[in-house]
Amino acid sequence: MDEYSLKSAGEELAKFADAISQLESRSRSEILFPYIFFASKKMSSRAISRWLSDERGIDFSAASVAKTLRECDKYFALIAERAHILAEHLAEQFDGCAEEILCQPFGMDRIRDLIDQNIPG
């Protein structure tokens, strides 16, 4: 393997690591949002806050729960942005496009096909 290939691989690895590190620097609201969103279909903000405190020792007020739910568009956009970053990385590996990977019902089938085509044996 030549120096250019190694340097290119290293740059790509650094770019991917940066995307992953951004995933790890999320706020508590951002991390809990998907779970709060689903729980809110059956529980009040107070009940969610109380459960987080009593069952998991997480201090997250009912007001914080309510604010997180009011800002759901922001959190859904963040989730979509992160999914797209990861899909772009996967698409680069298989000479595809992120949209093709993210679109259902073909996304998972396309990923499986690409993996099967690129893994020997």
Image (spheres, rainbow, N blue to C red):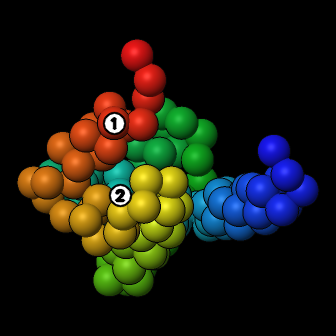
In the foreground, 108 or 29: 108
Could you tell whether 77 is left or right of 101 in the image? right
**Measured from the top left, where is residue 7 in percent x and y?**
85, 61
Q: Considering the image in quadrants, where does the C terminus appear?
A: top left
Q: In the image, is residue 24 above or below residue 119?
A: below
Q: Amino acid at mark 2?
A: Pro
Instruction: Answer left or right for 95 relative to 53.
Output: left
Is 1 above or below relative to 74?
above
Q: Residue at x 78, y 56 (%)?
A: 5
**Callout 1–callout 2 Cβ contact below 8 Å:** no
- Residue 117 image label: 1
Q: Residues within 10 Å of mark 1 (few under 14, many from 20)?
A: few
**Looking at the image, which is closer to me, 86 or 22?**
86
- Residue 21 in the image: state x and y as whole percent: 71, 60
Residue furthest to the right in view is: 3
Find numbered disc 1 in the image and state the secondary structure of the residue it sits on: helix
Mark found first going from the N terminus, 1 or 2: 2
Q: Is residue 37 visible?
A: no
Residue 29 image label? none
Q: Label 2's element?
A: helix
Q: Is residue 91 left or right of residue 113?
A: right
Q: Position of residue 29 (x, y in %)?
A: 52, 66
At a point 38% along the width and 79% down the height, the residue shown is 77
Badge 2 density bin: few <14, some 14–19, many ≥20, Cα 10 Å: some
Q: Amino acid at mark 1?
A: Gln
- According to the picture, the residue beneath numbered tag 2 turns out to be 34
